[in-house]
Amino acid sequence: MIFQQIANGLAMGSIYSLIALGLTMIYGVLGILHIAHAGIYALGAYLGLLCFRFVPNFWVAMAMAMILCAAAGWVVQRYLYQPLLKLPRIVPLIASIGLFIALEEIYRLIAGPYVIPFPADPGFKGIQIGNIQITNQQFLVFIVTFILLSFLWFIMNRTRTGLAMKATFQDMEIASVMGVNVPRTVALNFLIGSSLAGAAGVLVGVFYNSVYPTMGSIPAYKALAIIVLGGLGSIPGTVLGAFFIGLSETLLIGVVQVPFPRDALAFIIMILVLMFRPYGILGKG
Amino acid sequence: MISGYSITVSCMIGIYMILAMSLNIITGYAGQISLGHAAFFGIGAYSSALLSVKAGLPFWFSLPIAVIITACVGALLGIPCLRVKDDFLAITTMGINFVVEAVFLYIPFFGGAMGLGNIPFPKIFSYEFSKFHFLLMVLFFVLVCVAIDRWLIRSWAGTALEAIREDETAASVSGVDVTKFKVGAFTVGSGLAGLAGSLYAHFMSFISPYDFGFPQSIVILSMVVFGGIGALRGPIVGAIVLGAAPEIFRPIMEYRTLLYGGLLIFMMRFQPGGLLGEESFVFRFFLRRIYRGSP
Amino acid sequence: MMKRVMIVGFLFVGVLLISFPTYSQDIPIGFFAPLTGFAASDGRAAKNGVELGVSIVNDAGGIKGRKVKLIVYDDRHDSKEAVAIANRLIEKDNVVAVVSGSYSMPTRVTAPIFQKGKIPMVAGYAVHPDIVKGGNYVFRNGCLGEVEGAAAANVAVKLLKAKRNAVLTMDNDFGTELSRGYVARVEKLGAQIVSHQVYKLGEKDFTPFLTKTKEANPEVIFTSGYYNEAALVSRQAKALGIKAQILGEEGFDSPKFLEIGGDAAEGVIFVCLLNRDDPRPEVQNFLKKYKQAYGMDSEMCATTSYDAFMIIAKAIERSEPKPEAIRQAIATMKDIPGLLGKVKEFNEIGESKKPVQVQIVKGGQFRFFAEVTDPEVITPPSK
């Protein structure tokens, strides 16, 4: 039974990692806590659903959502964050929160407050390994996450763009001096990060057959806890953090049966880790 | 006479003023971004409510004890917060908010999901306060906060906090005991939030964990930033404008929240110093005449 | 200092100006619900239900020749807003009665205010027990949480003959109350609770809870939740191969449950207040009109709020549009006709007593399954 719970936890961890990755990349390059990222995630779900209405194919819908969310992310960066870069960090934080609130309301006003189903069938069947049931949705999550994470790994580690991005994370000024086109790299971070969020949105929408205006609330908080836990700005740290939280939450609730809400548990775990490593698991001072 | 509706709204605005000022001490003066201030609001409210309802204490005892309890918790939580910096701190405070809310929600002693009700209105010798008297009391406490605030700025503590805010390393090298002042700021800020919480609990007569969650922290923070972080006038104005706005805009209820989000974006984009910040439009055109220099 | 006085002065005047009352020939009735925020879906349904009631009444010529004017406010599921709304309804809008289309928290916090202001309030579906204890001006049309939970226990133990019961509780006031009633009654009837877990409001991933529940091998899983949780629990339970019967409550009573739950919703049983197979013309007419007006099937929040409004309308009809008279009329009403079945009367503290319906999802529709009329279960406390 515990292996079933581990499978459950890994599925959650996969979803969390897709959402949190974009957030940590954006933090890494701009130092901004982009809370509106969860709004882009929800946008992905809505756009994916819209595309699905025209072309009833899951993969097409996901691709479209990713592209459109990348564009949306770029717009946010260019017109909201860029002008605010030189100001104290609380300013872009509040602006981001304002944007998130506004986005939730826009979704509600346009699409209605109701939960809308997303009946896309990606064509997988669930599998059973011994006693463990991997539902078809969980299987889908694993496959998509694996594909996207591999893509990201490839870009970060095997391309010059990736090298430029890593340099910018480390130190923007030095990177610029070394010839890296910093504004382009920043934009690229937003594009990639937002498209991942869009993919996560579609995935979650299909996974739970639910798309609704406030679907970004919980990921907003959870993703913040995860990127802090993993180390702000560290991509491997975030992936690690996402799976760590996904697993611990599930095991604490499902096996140990701690009578405490999931989100609070995630934050407690984060705080405990911070007590020992104040910069997160893989963060640097 | 003045309607009960106006008094109710004014009381809430007064309570928000105290909350905004208390957060300003932590975030504006000491420069520590706190995203979980509603947790202290809640601790004050629940302490005061429990003391009155379960221990039968009169309001005049519950209030100061609640303030002390909240200040102690603030000091206690200030200590782990010291280990983390900047954005890690911000998220940690957010986490504290979630944990405190969860404690109120899941532990039956605090009433759990059903909340705590029948919290009594203040009485003087069995003569119960009217809402108008309550408003006067709230205004009194607002003035108390203003006084504490002024004292803080003008004292040695104020200078130390400013030094810490500007550059922590330089401050500590210059001999400022950074730890002591940071924890001090947390203590005073949370104590005042506890005061607001106690007033809130006895005013509403019913509290529930959802009153003190993360969204509430954001409301308080946006009041501080909207008005202008740092100077005292900022949080007060922020509380008035953002506290009255939901009522004034009630007729367009479908769009209220959208307006609020848009307002935050707009303000940060064009007036990041706040409505009454140094560089703001309002300050430059109207208030320079009234303020002759000193903040 | 002067500047502060000025600003406070301006805003005070502003707030005063907007609190002046307005006059008209219409009968003003107040209504509040969460129209924005996480509960907006239910709030919108409640608003739809009441507005349909208002249009039906007004199209028939109004009450005693005067039309009903519904004054709608959004409480965002926030106590502070609810308190401000209550004061505003009483003083600015001069309402003669109020329908609460909101959850327990805003209803609970405004009950004493309406009591003090001597304006009768009928709560559509809020379940908190303390609501009616606000006083004799507060009535509950919907079902008390523990009564509904107890009715569900009757279904589980007596109808479904389940000895082993698992409980999955939503952690807010609604879920907690229902589960409390369920657990108490199950144990009283001599059956077992083999697993009891609590999940957070808004939870979407139930696999950890369900996996643990599956281990306990229950025959029935009583699940509290709103339609999204209902649908997700059903789907995830099915995917995990759980064979136990899913038993729900009135939160399941929404076409959205069927939409999102899909195949997994088939066979789910839940207790609620509306019997969709009820042959009475008023029920079938309402269902048809609602679908026409809003393009989707009615749900629990809409029907209960509609009934709450109709009770007030009938009370005004039998007396006059003055708060004290309305209160008196409601309190002494006998055999109140409603969509939710005939309500005998409101008891001393304002609770209504009526049979609890049990519906089952068959062929993708809600069908009648049973009715719980056991007086031990459905009689609400009278103090």
Image (spheres, coloured by chain):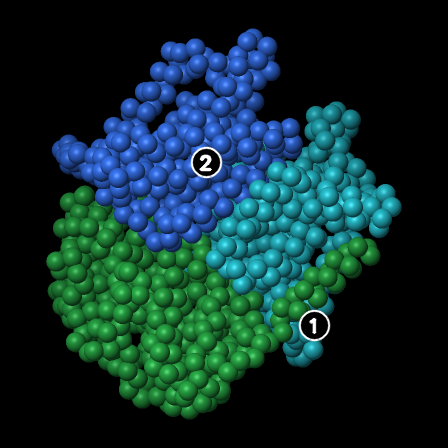
Chain colours: A blue, B cyan, C green
Tell me the quadrant of the picture where the C terminus of chain C can be found: bottom left
The residue at the point 67 percent across, 40 percent down is B271
Chain designation of label 2:
A
The one nearer the camera, B115 or C351, is C351
- The residue mark sitting in front, 1 or 2, is 2
* Looking at the image, residue A224 lies above or below residue C179: above
Q: Can residue B34 be seen from the camera position used here?
A: no
* Looking at the image, residue C233 lies above or below residue C333: above
Residue C263 % position (x, y):
16, 50
Inspect the image, locate mark 1, and give the three-letter code of the amino acid beneath it. Answer: His
* Looking at the image, residue A224 lies above or below residue B73: above
Q: Can residue A111 be seen from the camera position used here?
A: yes
CA–CA distance in space, label 1 to label 2: 46 Å
Residue A109 % position (x, y):
42, 52
The one nearer the camera, A191 or B34, is A191
Q: Which residue is mark 2?
A: A37
Q: Secondary structure at mark 2?
A: helix
Q: Residue furthest top?
A: A178
Residue A30: image quadrant is: top right
* Looking at the image, residue B217 lies above or below residue B119: above
Residue C143 % position (x, y):
32, 72
Residue C83: image quadrant is: bottom right
Disc ID at residue B133: 1
